[in-house]
Image (cartoon, rainbow, N blue to C red):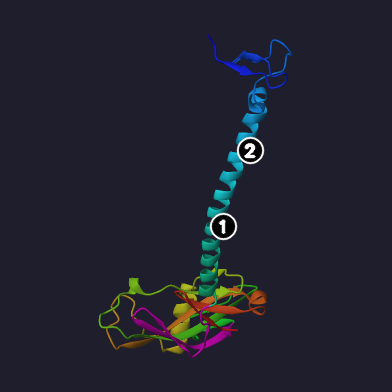
Amino acid sequence: MSKLVNCKACEKEIAKGVKKCPSCGKDQRSWFGRHKILSFIGAIIILGGIGSALGGGSEETSSSVSKSGEVKQEAKKEEVQFKVGDIIKVDSLEYTVTKVEEKDKVGNEYINKTVSNGGTFVAIQYTVKNVGDEPVGMFDYPSINLVDEKGAKYDADIDASSNYAIETDIDNSKIASDLNPDIQVTATDVYEVSKAKYSQGKWFIHIGDAKVQLK
């Protein structure tokens, strides 16, 4: 025989577990029992809120880490900016950009190259010294590029650079051999860029991650 309980409304004894009172018809189930769908939806909302809060905390940490990383990256971008004549150390090599000039033609009366229509030659001279304890091969040299203020990189014009080396007669850089400790050489590079663009904005020589402002 079922255990008897009192009706929630009329308080007459009824069997435990019945859904409605036989006397007054009052539903004996709890609110959650009567509204299972709403209870289920409410549970999902609560769990979702908890998950969001936990995820938000994690995201905030991630965001914090991300922001910290961005600050560090920004700090890298704002590293010391060099100027012509400054010594720049890249690993065991010391670079110094000694001269920058804009030209329409490079070379001598016998071997020369004229700039393309609408362009200009940006010619640089620089020294490289091995301040380390071991020889440095050409494949260990940092890359050198002319860069505009928007970050566009330009490679040296090989023909123009060779002609400029002949014109200046100062280039004694190592091409196939190593640069030994305590040895310094002078090198030359020439870049062909738009004359109109070069006349505007800032321009740099990037030596590895270091940058030298030319104008």
Q: Determine which quarter of the picture holds residue 117.
A: bottom right
Q: Residue furthest left?
A: 134
Closer to us: 36 or 75: 36
> Distance from label 1 to label 2 (Cα)?
22 Å
Residue positioned 53% across, 74% down in the render: 75
Residue positioned 58% across, 39% down in the render: 47
Give residue 104's position: percent from left, percent from top: 59, 81
Q: Is residue 38 left or right of residue 208?
A: right
Q: Are marks 1 and 2 in contact (CB under 8 Å)?
A: no
The part of the chain drawn in magenta is 79-103
Residue positioned 53% across, 53% down in the render: 58
Which residue is labeled 2 in the image?
45
Amino acid on which the number 1 mark rests in the picture: Glu
Give residue 11's position: percent from left, percent from top: 69, 19
Amino acid on which the number 2 mark rests in the picture: Ile
Residue positioned 55% across, 54% down in the render: 57
The answer to whether residue 79 is visible is yes
Is 167 above or below relative to 5? below
Callout 2 crowding tier (Cα within 10 Å): few <14, some 14–19, many ≥20: few
Q: Is residue 80 left or right of residue 170?
A: right
Give residue 1's position: percent from left, percent from top: 53, 8
